Amino acid sequence: MTKVRIILVTALLILIFGTDRASAQWTVIDPSNIAQSIVNSSKSLVQESTTATNMVNNFKETVKIYQQAKKYYDALQSVNNLVRDARKVQQTVLMLGDISGYYVNNFKKMLTDPNFTSSELSAIASGYTRLLEEANGVLGDLKQVVNITTLSMTDKDRMDVVDDCYKEMKRLKNLTAYYTNKNISVSYLRAKKKADTQRVVSLYGDGSEKYW
């Protein structure tokens, strides 16, 4: 990799993580803080929700955090014409947003799904939280690439970290999608026994039919 490409990758990392506020034109927040806020909100939801109504009310804060974060991810998505490795950095962070989206958008529907009990919803939320925590840990590894104290790292070392983080985040994104689809399939199978599958299809969308 040329020095120019290294500089471009590093510049994108700086812009993403906001370590150089003077150059940050489209972000004022660290994506790892976004994810951690969603994790903290989700943990509170699981710990404090004793009824379905409590869970719905407590989940509103998680939705609010995600909606604010989506503006950040939309801005990052609009950055074009990046070199290959810089695009890997971009896509790694965007996949964290995708994982958050899987959780927030689908769990919001699950909260209105009569085929899940409150205890099951709590367990599902815990599973999403664990996945999001792991994904945020990957982002922490990526963040170290621009940490000026890691002077012992060569350019190749830094790009290897970027590559590894990209692959691991992609794995977690796919795992989150699988986890979502398996939970929806449980609802579908329960609805099938009650001859009420159309309700599930309407709730989660026709596109989900391939998962059951």
Image: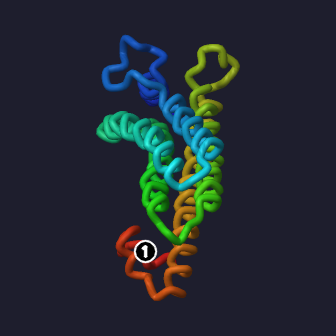
Residue 205 placement (x, y as % from top left): 36, 70
| Secondary-structure class at tag 1 | helix
Question: Measured along the vertical axis of the image, is residue 113 above or below residue 189?
Answer: above
Look at the picture and state if 21 lies above or below 166: above
Q: Point out residue 55 in the picture as x, y percentages from the top left corner.
A: 53, 49
53 lies left or right of 203: right
- Residue 81, compared with residue 110, is above or below; it is above
- Residue drawn where x is 55% and y is 80% of the image: 190
Instruction: Please report the residue visible at 32 percent of the width from the left and 25 percent of the height from the top.
Output: 26
Viewer-proximal residue among 91 and 5: 91
Q: Is residue 24 left or right of residue 188?
A: left
Q: Position of residue 17 (x, y in %)?
A: 48, 25
Amino acid type indicated by mark 1: Val
- Tell me how many marks there are: 1
| Outermost residue to the right | 152
Which color scheme does this rendered protein use?
Answer: rainbow
Q: Work out which residue is located at the far top of the displayed protein and give it.
A: 22
Q: Is residue 163 visible?
A: no
Q: Nearer the viewer, residue 17 or 3?
A: 17
The answer to whether residue 152 is visible is yes
Residue at numbered disc 1: 200
Quadrant for residue 42, please give it.
Answer: top right
The residue located at (40%, 38%) in the rendering is 64
Q: At 56% from the left edge and 57% from the top edge, which residue is drawn?
A: 176
Above-or-below relation of 80 to 147: below
Could you say which is closer to the camera, residue 105 or residue 95?
A: 105
- Between 66 and 77, the residue placed more toward the observer is 66
Q: Quadrant of residue 73?
A: top left
Task: Characterize the local packing of mark 1: few (<14), some (14-19) or many (20 or more) Cα atoms within 10 angstroms.
Answer: many
